[in-house]
Image (cartoon, coloured by chain):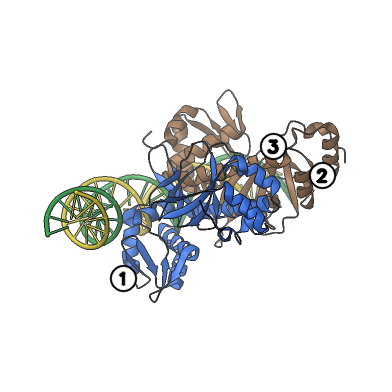
Chain colours: A blue, B brown, C yellow, D green
DNA sequence: GGCGAACTTTGCGTTTGCTCAAACTTCCGG
DNA sequence: CCGGAAGTTTGAGCAAACGCAAAGTTCGCC
């Protein structure tokens, strides 16, 4: 497989490496395409590989014993994921699913240690990513615990626009497919409630939405809604 | 200050070190006592030191802009905490408060890197701790999102007994002071609801509680309550 | 030993958001 | 172009939990 070194230059975990080092890392990598809805790896399975998302979007989800699921975080292009080894785990702690058609590189997990040892900055940048992720989850947890459903949904919409918003004439469009059900899995509510909220907001001119697609036309209004007493 | 090397031998981050190395680490450390309710460090402040809890219990909390707070995790004796550097953060991402009278060692944060570089196994064990913590928070998040209040409160009581339960004739007693309000901060509900639940459970002979103190007399019944449709 | 602060209990009215149910729309494959 | 699957909308009734309020209890301090 031909992979150009330009794929990795500039990405945080590799930014301090020279062309030759990146060439070497790419030679170790496997590239694969995932259809929307495809599972990359599953919670509880042996963590055999770690990944880097090149294009697309992923959801990282956890499933409860009784079948309910919740979306723990999203992965955007350029991010490492499935790095169980960094946390000294031998199995994946969650499941990764492609939210849109996606392309990812992956490496055998045994290379993790050698990259950490061999490449200056690789470990540092990886742990920074982990730290950010931990912070995000704490924020999500805090929101979940203290805010009403309407505020949580508003906050989640805003986060998605920040994370992958594309400017259009109408407003900021979320750059990957999202269903009402997905949003309910992110906010711990039901798709019914989400649908009602979106309908109400559409009436107020705050969002425009169609099947699997949402455009935020008035981010400022949403911002107010995401804060208590706002 | 005289600190015996036995304080650290056997604790995961130091388990692979010899007596002389531990002696050195202890010489770098500062020991301090914290009263119940005292703050060890605060969210947003410069992360100047990292800590190890020797005795007592801590709550790690986050406060929202409008004053609500939620307890993200508990720290038990033997655990490292405030290790912002491990996550490449320059400020503490949460606040640590003593839940009971506690004793902790601390080191200047600049020593973090040197310990990681110098002592075999220190980094590894620390990241393992972090991984466990991330897993715990994900579990909490999942519970928060999918379970009803009664189930969350039951689950939190069980977790606290597992974490610091002491067997008594009556049952398993939680080993540090807990108020109804604390529990509501852990579960995202109100102290009123928690009080009602505890009263009901007391009537059913599942728990015995007094001011700031809870004994679980029937863990099995609580277990059932913590599962949906149980 | 009495006062005040901290903690807990309980009641009541209200509301949020869930469940259940059914119809509608969009999309894709055959 | 038709049929079914996937996703969305909306309604109605209901229950869980909150907000507010007020009183009771325990504890530590002066």
Q: From mark 2 to mark 3, how far is it between C-alphas?
A: 16 Å
Left or right relative to B19: residue A105: left
- SS label for mark 1: helix
List the residue tagged with mark 1: A203
Front-most of B30 and B108? B108
Percent position (x, y) of residue B194?
48, 44
Residue with the most extreme right position:
B1
* Mark 2 and mark 1 residues within 8 Å of each other at the beta carbon: no
**Residue B90 higher or lower than A62, as above or below:** below
Q: Foreground mark, 1 or 3?
A: 1
- SS label for mark 3: loop
Quadrant of res B134 = top right
Which label number is shown at residue B77? 3
* Crowd class of label 1 (few under 14; some 14 to 19; many from 20; radius 10 Å): few
Q: Mark 3 lies on which chain?
A: B
List the residue tagged with mark 2: B29
Question: Would residue A188 be visible to someone looking at this image?
Answer: no
Front-most of A23 and B121? A23
* Crowd class of label 2 (few under 14; some 14 to 19; many from 20; radius 10 Å): some
- SS label for mark 2: loop
Percent position (x, y) of residue B85?
70, 52
């Amino acid at each position: 497989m031909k992979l150009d070194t330009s794929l990795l230059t500039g990405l945080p975990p590799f930014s301090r490496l020279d062309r030759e080092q990146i060439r070497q890392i790419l030679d170790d990598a496997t590239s694969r395409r995932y259809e929307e809805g495809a599972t990359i790896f599953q919670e509880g399975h042996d963590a055999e590989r770690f990944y880097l998302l090149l294009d697309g979007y992923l959801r990282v989800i956890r499933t409860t014993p009784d079948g309910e699921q919740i979306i723990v975080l999203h992965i955007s292009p350029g991010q490492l994921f499935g790095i169980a080894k960094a946390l000294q785990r031998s199995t994946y702690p969650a499941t990764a699913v492609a939210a849109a058609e996606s392309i990812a590189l992956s490496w055998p997990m045994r290379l993790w240690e050698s990259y950490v040892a061999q490449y200056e900055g690789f470990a540092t940048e990886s742990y920074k990513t982990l730290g950010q992720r931990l912070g995000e989850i704490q924020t999500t947890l805090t929101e979940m615990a203290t805010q009403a459903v309407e505020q949580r949904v508003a906050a989640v919409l805003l986060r998605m626009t920040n994370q992958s918003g594309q400017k259009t004439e109408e407003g900021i469009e979320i750059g990957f497919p999202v269903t009402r059900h997905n949003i309910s899995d992110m906010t711990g509510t039901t798709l019914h409630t989400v649908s009602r909220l979106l309908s109400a907001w559409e009436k107020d001119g705050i969002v425009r939405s169609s099947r699997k697609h949402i455009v935020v036309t008035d981010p400022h209004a949403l911002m107010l809604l995401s804060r208590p007493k706002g």
